[in-house]
Amino acid sequence: METCIGAHNKAVYLIEEMKKPAPKDPNFETWNTKNHKVKSWLIDLMSPLLMQQFFHLSTAKEYGRLCQKPSMMDRTKFIFF
């Protein structure tokens, strides 16, 4: 999955580099659309049980953070490796 996200130049949505703009920022809609795209790619790879733990998160960056937690590493390593 990391290769797919990187190939589409969207890896910044999973790490700290891409900050969420304020809702009134002219770039917000573009950011929001791309953020949803990355989240959907990740959700598509998850089992329904795993999906429940991610669905409430609002940004792809939050998905990335949760996947890096030691308690989630075994369940989510297939997403990034």
Image (cartoon, rainbow, N blue to C red):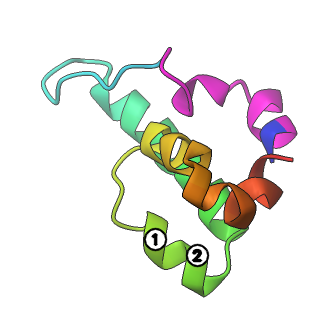
Residue 72 is situated, as x and y percent measured from the top left of the image, at: 60, 59
- Residue 42 in view of the camera: yes
The answer to the question of whether label 1 and label 2 lie on touching residues, with beta carbons closer than 8 A, is yes
Q: Residues within 10 Å of mark 2 (few under 14, many from 20)?
A: some
The magenta stretch spans which residues? 3-17
Residue 55 vertical position relative to residue 27 in the rendered view, above or below: below
Q: Residue furthest left?
A: 24
Residue 63 is left or right of residue 38, and the answer is left
State the residue position of label 2.
50
Q: Which residue: 87% across, 47% down? A: 81
Residue 12 is situated, as x and y percent measured from the top left of the image, at: 58, 23
Q: Residues within 10 Å of mark 1 (few under 14, many from 20)?
A: few
Residue 61 vertical position relative to residue 81 in the rendered view, above or below: above
Residue 20 is left or right of residue 47, and the answer is left
Q: Residue furthest bottom?
A: 48
Residue 12 is left or right of residue 26, and the answer is right
State the residue position of label 1.
53
Residue 34 is situated, as x and y percent measured from the top left of the image, at: 51, 37
Query: Which of the two residues, 36 or 30, is positioned nearer the viewer here?
Result: 36
**Secondary structure beneath disc 1?**
helix
47 magenta-colored: no
Q: Which residue: 69% across, 67% down? A: 75
- Circle 2: residue type: Leu
